[in-house]
Amino acid sequence: MIRNAIATTLFLAVASPCVAGQWVKSDDKGLSVYNLRDGQKQINMACDPEALWDPPEYHVTVSDGRTFLAGDRAEVKSGRETITLPLSGDSFLAGKDTKHWNKLVAMLTKPGTVTFRDGKSEIAVKIDAAIKNDCMK
């Protein structure tokens, strides 16, 4: 049930208006939802800083406009930093690994290009400006 609600929130975020390379924040049923579009490529981040869901849910999805990241793991690169994180369905989840989650959030919320590789595809997204967020755990 919780996962369906989060998935619906992220799906609806695809249709929300975004300025290219700029994060746009909205709130949906108490969740903080951040969307960024770079051409057809898109990053969606849903965060539950007030623990409205039990347990709290934090997700990041990445799409090239046609498909989402797939597989068990994906590599994320920004500047000189590279991390590899597990995927659950098409999402990065915060889970218990707060160190890597917080690094992912930091990479996604500062200017620069972030590249995602899932073994089959590569998606590079340009982020034009930083955004304050409530997604750190």
Image (cartoon, rainbow, N blue to C red):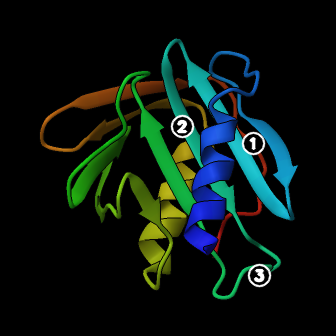
Look at label 3 and name its amino acid: Ala
- Asked if labels 3 and 2 touch by Cβ distance under 8 angstroms, the answer is no
Q: Nearer the viewer, mark 1 or mark 2?
A: 2
Left or right: where 27 falls relative to 96: right
Return the disc, 1 or 2, that comes first in the chain's sequence: 2
**Residue located at (66% from left, 80% from top):** 56
Q: Which mark is residue 51?
A: 3
Residue 87 point in image, percent of width and height: 32, 61
Q: Position of residue 89 (x, y in %)?
A: 35, 58
Mark number, residue 131: 1
**Given the image, on which type of amino acid does mark 1 rest?**
Ile
Q: CA distance from mark 2 to mark 3?
A: 22 Å
Q: Which residue is pictured at 84% across the width and 44% down the height?
A: 26
Q: Quadrant of the C terminus?
A: bottom right
> Which mark is on residue 9?
none
SS of the residue at dot 1?
loop
Quick one: label 1 or label 3, which is nearer the N terminus? 3
Q: Earlier in the sequence, mark 2 or mark 3?
A: 2
Mark 2 highlights which residue?
43
User: Badge 3: how crowded within 10 Å, few (<14), some, or many (20+)?
Assistant: few
